[in-house]
Image (tube, rainbow, N blue to C red):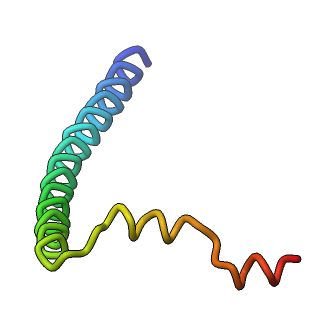
Amino acid sequence: MAAKQAQNKDEQIGFHKGALTTLAKEREEMYKILQIVEQLMQMHIKGLKELGIDLEAEAKKMKQPSKKMEDRLR
């Protein structure tokens, strides 16, 4: 039985190591995708700035509730 338990333990160790290897590769690929998305976002931000759009002002507008919504809540 001791040999069987040792084999089972070795199988479990192999399983966990394999899973970690696979997940590490998946994480690397996810990071690559994130970098591409970030580059694309920066490209669009630059394009909007060149067109005179103030993104910080736009973001502030979005955070403020509209007057109509405030009136509806009263």
The C terminus lies in quadrant: bottom right
Q: Which residue lies furthest to the top in this view?
A: 2
Q: Where is residue 44 in the image (x, y as percent from the top left)?
A: 16, 73
Q: How many labels does the image show?
A: 0
Q: Where is residue 24 in the image (x, y as percent from the top left)?
A: 21, 41
Please identify the quarter of the rendering in which residue 23 is found. top left
Residue 2 or residue 18, whichever sits in front: 18
Residue 14 or residue 28, whichever sits in front: 28
Q: Position of residue 73 (x, y in %)?
A: 84, 77
* In the image, residue 34 above or below residue 3: below
Give the side of residue 47 with respect to residue 34, left or right: left
Give the side of residue 13 with respect to residue 51, left or right: right
Q: Residue at x 32, y 25 (%)?
A: 7
The N terminus lies in quadrant: top left
Residue 8 or residue 21, whichever sits in front: 21
Give the side of residue 28 with respect to residue 12, left or right: left
Q: Position of residue 72 (x, y in %)?
A: 81, 84
Residue 25 or residue 31, whichever sits in front: 31
Q: Which residue lies furthest to the right in this view?
A: 74
Q: Which residue is drawn at 54% across and 65% down?
A: 63
Q: Residue at x 29, y 25 (%)?
A: 10
Q: Which residue is drawn at 11% across and 68% down?
A: 43
* In the image, residue 45 above or below residue 23: below
* In the image, residue 67 above or below residue 9: below
